[in-house]
Amino acid sequence: MIQQLIEKIQKTHAPICVGLDPMLSYVPEHIRRRSFAEFGETLEGAADAIWTFNREIVDATWDLIPSVKPQIAMYEQFGIEGLKVYEKTVRYCQEKGLIVIGDAKRGDIGSTSAAYAAAHLGSVKVGDTVCRAFDTDFVTVNPYLGSDGVKPFVDVCRSEDKGIFVLVKTSNPSSGEFQDRLIDGKPLYEHVADKVEEWGADTMEGGYSNVGAVVGATYPQMGAALRRRMPHTYFLVPGYGAQGGTAEDLRACFNEDGLGAVVNSSRGIIAAYRKESYEKFGPEHFAEASRQAVIDMIADINRVL
C-alpha cells in the first residue's frame, strides 16, 4: 500500500493529505440550512450537512492530491448517522482514486486490536460471507499498549496490502509530557521509533515499509532525528499550517529525493474560505477556496524540497 501512496504523490507532485475533519461550524450556513430543512436539527441533519460539505471539497480537490485523512471522531460525535457519513466519505474518496488514511488512533489488547484492525483495514466473516466494514487504506495506531496491541494491525498490513501510521512524536503541545520522558538515556518517542522500524521490517515495499509513523511538523529538530532513526519509515506529518508548522519545519521529515513524508492539513484547507487570504471566495464558493488552499500548500512545500 505504501508504494501506491508514493506513486500517487509522484504523479501529483503533491506530498500532501487533506484532512477531512469537519466540525459542523465549518459547514457554510446555506448547506446547514438546507440539511436542517429536510432532516431537522437532528443528528441526521448534521450528518447530511457534513456529507454535502465533504463531497464538494473532494470534488474540488481530488485531481490535485494523492490522499485524504478523515478523522473518525468528527463523525462519531453525530452517532451512527455520523459513522454512516464516515463510511460514505471513505467510499467516495476511494472511487475518486484517492488513498484514504483513517485517523482512528486505535490500539488495545491483542484481541481488541485484532477487531479494530478487521474493522478499519481488513474483513470479517459473517457465516460463509467475507464482509468489509470501513476498509480504509491506512489507519493511525496508538502504540502505548505495546507490541501485542500493534501486531494485529501489522498482520493485516501483510495479508491485505494495507498500511498503518503509528503515533511516534505527535504535534500537540502537551505531547512531551509522556513522549519526551527519558528512559534508559533516550526519550520515549525514540524507543517507539525503534519498534516501528522493527514492526515494519517484514512489510517492505521497495525502500519503505507499510508501517509508517506520525511525526509532527511542530517539532522540526525531533523530526530530523527521527528521519535518521527510521530510514525505512514513511512519515504522516500533522501540524502544518493552523497548528503553526511551516514548510521549513517539515523539510527534515523528507529524504533527499523528496519522498519519505506526506503532510496533512485539515482546517487550513477545508475551512479555507473563513481565512482572510481566501475570503474573496465567500461561503457559497467554499470548495473553490479549498482548491486554492491546496494549490498554495503544494507550492509552499515543494518550494523547500
Image: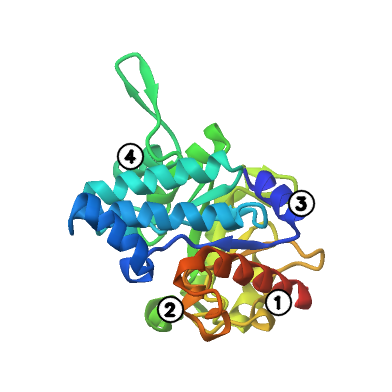
Please give the name of the residue rendered at 64% of the width and 53% of the height, measured from the top-left corner. Answer: 66
Quick check: 109 left or right of 40?
Answer: right
Residue mark closest to the camera, 3 vs 4: 3
Residue holding disc 1: 300
Q: How is the image coloured?
A: rainbow
Q: From what the image shows, is residue 188 above or below residue 100?
A: below
> Residue at the spot x=63%, y=70% of the render?
292
Q: Residue at x 76, y 51 (%)?
A: 11
Q: Name the residue rendered at 76%, 71% in the picture.
A: 302
- Could you tell me which secondary element the residue under label 3 belongs to? helix
Position in image of residue 77 (x %, y %) = 25, 59
Q: As shown in the figure, which amino acid type bears the numbered disc 4?
A: Ala
The front one of 171 and 71 is: 71
Task: Using the image, determine if residue 77 lies above or below residue 201.
Answer: below
**View extreme (right): residue:** 257
Q: State the SS at label 1.
A: helix
Q: Earlier in the sequence, mark 3 or mark 4?
A: 3
C-alpha span from label 2 to label 4 = 28 Å
Describe residue 213's horizontal placement relative to residue 130 as left or right: right
Q: Which mark is residue 214?
A: none
Give the CA separation, mark 4 to mark 1.
40 Å
* Amino acid residing under circle 3: Lys
Is residue 18 or residue 248 the one in the foreground?
18
Closer to the observer: label 4 or label 1?
Answer: 1
Residue 164 visible in the snapshot: yes
* Whether label 2 touches label 3, CB < 8 Å: no
User: Which residue is label 2 attached to?
Assistant: 172
The amino acid at mark 2 is: Asn
Q: Name the mark on residue 11.
A: 3
| Image quadrant where one finds the C terminus | bottom right
Helix, strand or loop at label 2? It is loop
Between the residue at mark 2 and the residue at mark 3, the CA separation in whole angstroms equals 31 Å
